[in-house]
Image (spheres, rainbow, N blue to C red):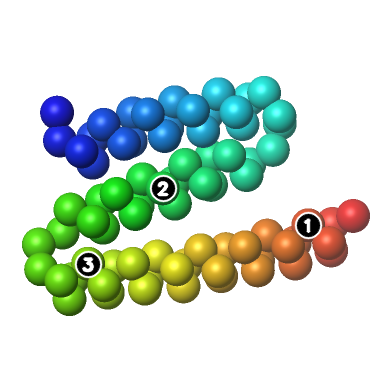
């Protein structure tokens, strides 16, 4: 089984289980970030890996910013 598929199974299962347990979308978001990092690490070429990880960090930071803004505006 490829590493990307295994990470999706493991992180997806743990993320969904923790999300159902704590009733918060944080664990599934972390599972998605971890799975994306594993998929980015399997890309061929150093430049592609670096670009994918930089894009992942930008999307993660943007998502965290939007979540904190929405969370504070809804309360």
For marks 3 and 1 on the same chain, the one whose residue lies earlier in the sequence: 3
Q: Is residue 48 above or below residue 67?
A: below
Give the CA separation, mark 2 to mark 3: 14 Å
C-beta proximity under 8 Å, tags 2 and 1: no
Which residue corresponds to the image point at 47% horizontal and 42% vertical from the top-left?
31
Taking 74 as reference, is 57 left or right?
left
Which residue corresponds to the image point at 9% horizontal and 62% vertical from the top-left?
44
**Picture quarter containing residue 47?**
bottom left
Residue at the right extreme of this rendering: 75
Residue 43: image location, x then y, percent:
15, 59
Q: Which residue is mark 3?
A: 49
Q: Which residue is mark 1?
A: 71
Which residue corresponds to the image point at 15% horizontal and 71% vertical from the top-left?
46
In the picture, the disc for residue 34 is 2
Tell us which disc is closer to us: 3 or 1.
3
**Picture quarter containing residue 68?**
bottom right
Q: Split into 4 quadrants, where in the image is the N terminus?
A: top left
Q: Split into 4 quadrants, where in the image is the C terminus?
A: bottom right
Residue at the front extreme of this rendering: 46
Residue 41: image location, x then y, percent:
23, 56
For label 3, count other residues whose C-alpha is less than 10 Å away and answer few (under 14), some (14-19) or many (20+). Answer: some
Tag 3 secondary structure: helix
Taking 44 as reference, is 50 left or right?
right
Give the CA separation, mark 3 to mark 1: 32 Å
Tag 1 secondary structure: helix
For label 2, count other residues whose C-alpha is less than 10 Å away and answer few (under 14), some (14-19) or many (20+). Answer: some
Give the CA separation, mark 2 to mark 1: 23 Å
């Amino acid at each position: 089984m490829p590493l990307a598929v295994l990470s999706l199974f493991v992180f997806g299962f743990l993320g969904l289980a923790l999300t159902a347990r704590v009733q918060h979308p944080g664990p599934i978001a972390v599972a998605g970030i971890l799975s994306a990092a594993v998929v980015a690490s399997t890309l061929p070429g150093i430049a592609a890996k670096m670009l994918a990880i930089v894009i992942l960090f930008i999307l993660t930071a943007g998502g965290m910013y939007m979540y904190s803004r929405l969370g504070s505006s809804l309360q």
